Image (cartoon, grey):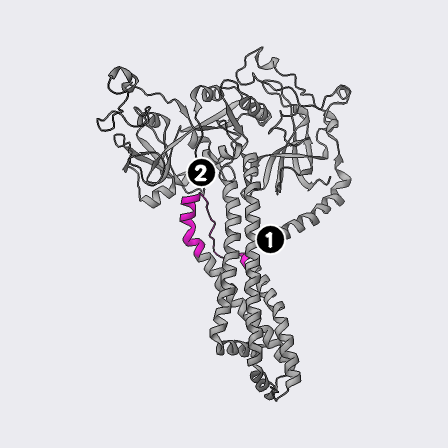
Amino acid sequence: MRQALIRLLTILLAFVPLLQAGAAALQIDWIELVPADKRADFDPAPPPPVHDYLTGEGGGLAAQQPLDFSVNMELEGKEIRIPGFVVPLELDEEGNVTEFFLVPYFGACIHVPPPPPNQMVHVIMKKGIKLDSMYSAYWITGKLSARTRTTRLGAAAYTLAGSDYEEYKF
Amino acid sequence: MKPLIGLAARSLWNRRGSAALTVFAIAISVTLLVGVETVRISARESFARTISGTDLIVGARSGPINLLLYSVFRVGDATANVSLQSYQLVSRHPDVAWTIPISLGDSHRGFRVMGTTDDYFRHYRYGNRQALAFISGGPFMGERDAVIGAEVARRLGYRIGDEITIAHGIGEVSFAEHGEHPFRIAGIVAPTGTPVDRTVHVSLDAIARIHEGWQGGAHSTGATTRHPHDRDDPEDAPAEEAAQPALSGITAFLVGMRSKDRLLQMQRALNEYRAEPLTAVIPGVALQQLWQIVGVADRALFIVATFVVLAGLIGMLTSILTSLRERRREMAILRSVGARPMHVFTLLLLEAGLLALAGVVLGILAAHATLAAATPALAGRYGLFMETGGPGIYDVLLAGAVVGAAVLAGLVPAWLAYRNSLADGLTIRT
């Protein structure tokens, strides 16, 4: 009963950002996360599995990265709205997902190799998502950061400070 | 209105036998509903708060949920161990910030014993990234130190400095005690509401030490437990008297990455590791999967409980309806002293409301009392930690809903009584 009420409220509230943030947030597609000059030969398939990441054998760690770390700098700091599947990383005490990877296809990181770094968004939500099922897709709204965070391997990833979410209707 | 409530209450008191039964039926149904709801919500919160800040849980090849259950919730057992080589490979990896080894399989008076390192107290997080704190003492320093959870300390009455022995195998009782290797309690962890409260922590070296000589499956240094087949020739067991026993493997380990960017690569690499079949899961994903399974059962429970409340209300309706006939005289008397048919109508609605209210209050109190009493057992047996903060807003809402439903149901007898009193007037035609 409580759940039904909360769900009803969530549905009602889902329209609020649609009205106000809909105008401000830039709705984007996953391909737009790839820099414009690389989109022509972009392959959406997951990259080949990396066997030697752990041991570092076979050409060393850097050599096994055919991964695309390039980011679309035009999106830096923009308020965006993007649909995707949620891979939960951190839950709050009520079991809501506060930190997660947003990925373009379901099962990323579970059955199939992770997508390339520029096809994944590391989201930290202001308020946790009540995730009913991992099979559901969500629209996530928030401020995107495309800053290249240079690690030892030169990896880059998008992070998003999530402010709103809404279930994606297929 | 006010005199009517008094009238309704006194009328019910006059029929207190059947009224009490009705109240009792509603109370039982409400107890069930509140109980199911509390267990449901606390279970979810208890699950969610158990692990936080850990990027990967790694164990022998099995399912994600299984791995989560045995490594973090200490429910069930591992199918196999993880080799120390694999553990060291991960712990020394440049992208890994910290690792916590976990070695399970022994017990102390029904509480699980976990072998680990002091990294556990430094890096393990629960709830909202809360670190473990100590009520007294501190992490284990040496091989003979044990750190116990708050629940262990409370239930067994242990203090810092007490000596305990650890038994082989899990369960309340074991007939194979590692008696020759006693432990001294070095620290007590503050309550967390997680399985940590119910765990006895010792160092990995200690686990290795107490299993020294157990490789054959039973302790073999004493004459009574001598292995019949391979102990005749002392040449067969040369490793037993080794100075520093080495652990052959650990049950599982937790991993914290330097950066989340590399988390998925690490998970993939571990799951595809060729030298040893391993399973690496992201705790958040495994918790969510676990909840999807448990969620079906708990929704079903909720539906059943709702129907029981409905049955209770229908029982109340039946008892009021059957009483109407014998109460025609009562209504006639009321009419004779100036009650209008509308008053009779209200009286019956109030009667239904009062019955339900009494039932709900009794039911909620009974539910919370039962939960408070059952909490230690639930935590002990199932690792389920209830939040028994007493009745809350939810209970008030529930009470309102049930009383509202009862008043709605009361419309039926109220309408009948209203019609009867109009037709009967002061005389009862039989």
Q: Residue at point 47% right, 48% down? A: B386
Q: Chain of mark 2?
A: B
Q: Is residue B4 among what the camera can see?
A: yes
Whether residue B401 is situated above or below residue B117 in the rendered picture = below
The quarter of the displayed image where residue B108 is located: top left
Q: Residue furthest left?
A: B223
Whether residue A45 is situated above or below residue B352 in the rendered picture = above
Residue B389 is inside the magenta segment: yes
Q: Is residue B137 among what the camera can see?
A: no
How far from the left and from the top, in percent, is residue A103?
A: 66, 31
Q: How many marks?
A: 2
How far from the left and from the top, in percent, is residue A167?
A: 69, 41
Q: Say which amino acid is labelled 2.
A: Val
Q: Which residue is mark 1?
A: A2
Q: Helix, strand, or loop for circle 1?
A: helix
| Quadrant occupied by the C terminus of chain B | bottom right
- Whether tag 2 and tag 1 are in contact, CB under 8 A, the answer is no
The quarter of the displayed image where residue A68 is located: top right
In the image shown, does B21 or B405 lie closer to the viewer?
Answer: B21
Residue B180 is inside the magenta segment: no
Q: Which residue is mark 2?
A: B75
Dot 2: few (<14), some (14–19), or many (≥20) neighbours within 10 Å? some
How far from the left and from the top, in percent, is residue A6?
A: 63, 50
Using residue B186 as the reference point, say whether residue B119 is left or right of it: right
Write the start and end of the magenta stretch as one range.
B370-395
Inter-mark Cα distance, 2 to 1:
30 Å
Pointers 2 and 1 within a single chain: no
Q: Helix, strand, or loop for circle 2?
A: loop
Q: Say which amino acid is labelled 1.
A: Arg
How far from the left and from the top, in percent, is residue B340?
A: 64, 83
Q: Residue furthest front?
A: B229
